[in-house]
Image (spheres, rainbow, N blue to C red):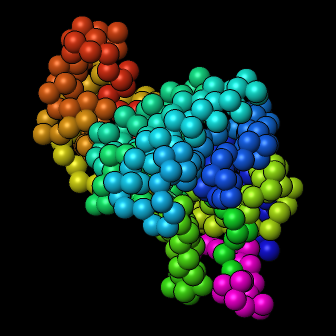
C-alpha cells in the first residue's frame, strides 16, 4: 500500500492534470456524450478548484464523437478519416465541456497541440505560457491533440503521453489518468484470476513494462503501454501520476475517497528535477552578464529582468539555454531565455516598461523567468 492516502497525495498537489479517456466521455452504444457523467466530473473539478487547486483537462473523445456524427464506417479508420472525425468531434467535445463547466461558473478554454508544438522549444514555451495565463485567470484549459493536422509522423497518437507532456510542461504536481481500468495489474485481469493490482510504482522497470498488455480499442489509442510511457515521463520530471477507474460518476471524488488505483510516485520533488534538467541536460547557446544588484536578486530567487543585464553574447533563440555570469564573468547559473539574442541585446539595461517600444511587440516581463532558472 502507499504510505500516504489518495486524499493526502491529491491534496498535497497544487497543479493537477486530469486525462479523460474516450470511453468515459462517449457512450459506446450511441456515440453520444455521457452528459450526466461529465456533469459529475465537472462538479468534482469545481470542488477542487474551490480549494485553490489548479486543474487542466486533457480530454480524448473527438474522434469517437466525430465518427458517428459524420457516419463514418465502424472499425479502424484511415488517418484522413480520423482527421475529419476529429474536426467534427472537437466542436462537440469543447461544447459539452463548456456546458458542463459553466453550470459551476467555470470558464473553459480549448488548446489543441501537436507533437511539434511540444518538441520545438519556442512553441513549447508559448503553449506553456498560455496555459499559465489561463490558470492565473482561473479558467480550465481543455487540451487535446490537434488530430486534424497531425499526421502519423508528428502525432502523439494517444492522449496518455500528451497528458504527461502537458503535465511536465506546466510543472504539474499530479497527473490523473481516468481510465476504464483501475490501474496496472500483474497480468491481464480479464484473462487471469490471479492478476493483482499494483498499488505503488516508483520506477517503470522492464518487469513493470512486462505486466502491461497491448490492448488498444477502436476509438481510443491508449492502453497500458502508453500509460507506462506517460508514467516514465512524469517520474523523470518528478510529477506524481495515478491510473484510476473513471467510468462511474464523480470519478475524482471516488479516487479521493480511496478507490483502488495505481500510484506512480517520484522520489524527488518537481522543482529539483526541473532545475536539474535546466542545469544539466541542455547545452548553453550564449551568455548574459548581470550587475551586482541582479546577482543578489537572482540568489534570492527572483527572475532576471532586462534592467540588470550588462552584456549579452552568443547566438540563441527564445527558449534556448544560456549561462548567467556575474560582473566578474563567473558563471552563477543557467536558464532558458525568454528572448532571442537579437531582442535581448536591444532590451538589456532597460526597464521592463520600455520593452514594447524597443522591440515593437509586448514581450515577457522577465529576460529569464525564475521557473526557467537555476542559480548555483
Ligand atoms: N485525440 C484523440 C481524440 O480526441 C484521442 C486519442 C486517445 O484516445 O488517446 O479522439
Question: Can I make out residue 307 in this image?
Answer: yes
Q: Main secondary structure of the magenta part?
A: loop
Apparent side of residue 242 relative to residue 230 in the rendered image (left or right): right
Residue 23 screen position, x and y as percent: 64, 58
Q: Nearer the viewer, residue 202 or 80?
A: 80
Residue 192 part of the magenta segment: yes
Reply yes or no: does residue 52 show up in magenta.
no
Residue at left offset 60%, top offset 66%: 267
Left or right of residue 199: residue 275: left
Q: Quadrant of residue 136?
A: top right
In the depicted structure, whether residue 22 falls above or below residue 139 = below
Residue 127 place in picture, x, y as percent: 41, 37
Residue 348 on image: x %, y %: 22, 21
Mark yes or no: residue 300 visible: no
Q: Residue at x 36, y 42 (%)?
A: 124
Total labels: the figure holds: 0
Residue at (63%, 67%) from the top-left corner? Answer: 264
Query: Where 1 falls versus 269 (above or below)?
Result: below
In this view, 234 is above or below 293: below
User: Viewer-proximal residue, 278 or 242?
Assistant: 242
Range covered by the magenta-colored residues: 187-203
Q: Does residue 6 appear to the left or right of 273 in the view shown?
A: right
Indicate whether 224 appears above or below 138. below
Q: Image point 79% across, 43% down: which residue?
A: 36
Looking at the rendering, in which quadrant would you find the N terminus?
bottom right
| x and y, in percent, of residue 79 in the image | 35, 58
**Residue in the foreground of this view, choosing between 294 and 22:** 22
Amino acid at each position: 500500500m502507499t504510505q500516504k492516502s489518495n486524499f493526502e497525495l491529491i491534496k498535497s498537489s497544487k497543479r493537477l492534470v486530469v486525462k479523460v479517456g474516450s470511453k468515459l466521455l462517449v457512450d459506446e452504444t450511441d456515440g453520444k456524450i455521457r452528459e450526466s457523467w461529465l456533469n459529475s466530473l465537472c462538479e468534482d473539478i469545481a470542488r477542487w478548484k474551490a480549494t485553490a487547486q489548479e486543474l487542466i483537462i486533457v480530454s480524448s473523445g473527438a474522434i469517437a464523437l466525430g465518427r458517428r456524427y459524420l457516419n463514418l464506417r465502424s472499425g479502424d479508420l484511415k488517418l484522413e478519416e480520423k482527421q475529419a472525425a476529429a474536426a467534427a468531434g472537437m466542436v462537440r467535445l469543447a461544447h459539452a465541456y463548456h456546458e458542463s463547466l459553466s453550470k459551476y461558473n467555470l470558464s473553459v478554454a480549448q488548446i489543441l497541440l501537436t507533437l511539434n508544438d511540444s518538441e520545438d522549444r519556442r512553441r513549447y514555451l508559448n503553449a506553456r505560457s498560455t496555459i499559465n495565463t489561463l490558470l492565473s485567470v482561473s479558467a480550465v484549459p481543455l487540451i487535446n491533440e490537434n488530430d486534424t493536422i497531425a499526421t502519423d509522423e508528428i502525432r502523439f497518437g494517444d492522449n496518455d503521453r500528451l497528458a504527461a507532456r502537458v503535465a511536465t510542461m506546466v510543472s504539474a504536481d499530479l497527473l490523473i489518468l481516468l481510465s476504464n481500468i483501475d490501474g496496472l495489474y500483474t497480468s491481464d485481469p480479464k484473462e487471469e484470476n490471479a492478476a493483482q493490482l499494483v498499488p505503488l510504482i516508483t520506477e517503470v522497470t522492464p518487469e513493470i513494462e512486462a505486466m502491461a498488455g497491448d490492448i488498444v480499442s477502436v476509438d481510443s489509442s491508449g492502453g497500458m503501454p502508453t500509460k507506462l510511457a506517460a508514467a516514465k515521463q512524469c517520474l523523470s520530471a518528478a510529477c506524481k501520476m495515478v491510473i484510476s477507474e473513471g467510468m462511474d460518476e464523480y470519478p475524482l471524488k471516488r479516487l479521493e475517497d480511496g478507490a483502488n488505483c495505481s500510484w506512480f510516485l517520484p522520489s524527488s520533488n518537481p522543482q529539483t528535477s526541473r532545475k536539474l534538467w535546466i542545469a544539466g541536460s541542455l547545452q548553453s547557446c550564449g551568455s548574459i552578464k548581470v550587475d551586482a544588484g541582479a546577482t543578489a536578486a537572482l540568489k534570492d530567487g527572483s527572475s532576471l529582468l532586462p534592467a540588470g543585464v550588462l552584456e549579452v553574447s552568443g547566438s540563441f533563440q527564445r527558449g534556448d539555454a544560456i549561462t548567467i555570469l556575474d560582473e566578474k564573468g563567473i558563471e552563477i547559473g543557467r536558464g532558458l531565455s525568454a528572448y532571442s539574442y537579437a531582442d535581448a541585446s536591444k532590451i538589456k539595461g532597460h526597464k521592463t516598461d520600455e520593452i514594447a517600444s524597443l522591440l515593437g511587440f509586448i514581450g515577457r516581463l522577465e529576460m529569464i523567468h525564475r521557473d526557467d532558472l537555476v542559480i548555483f
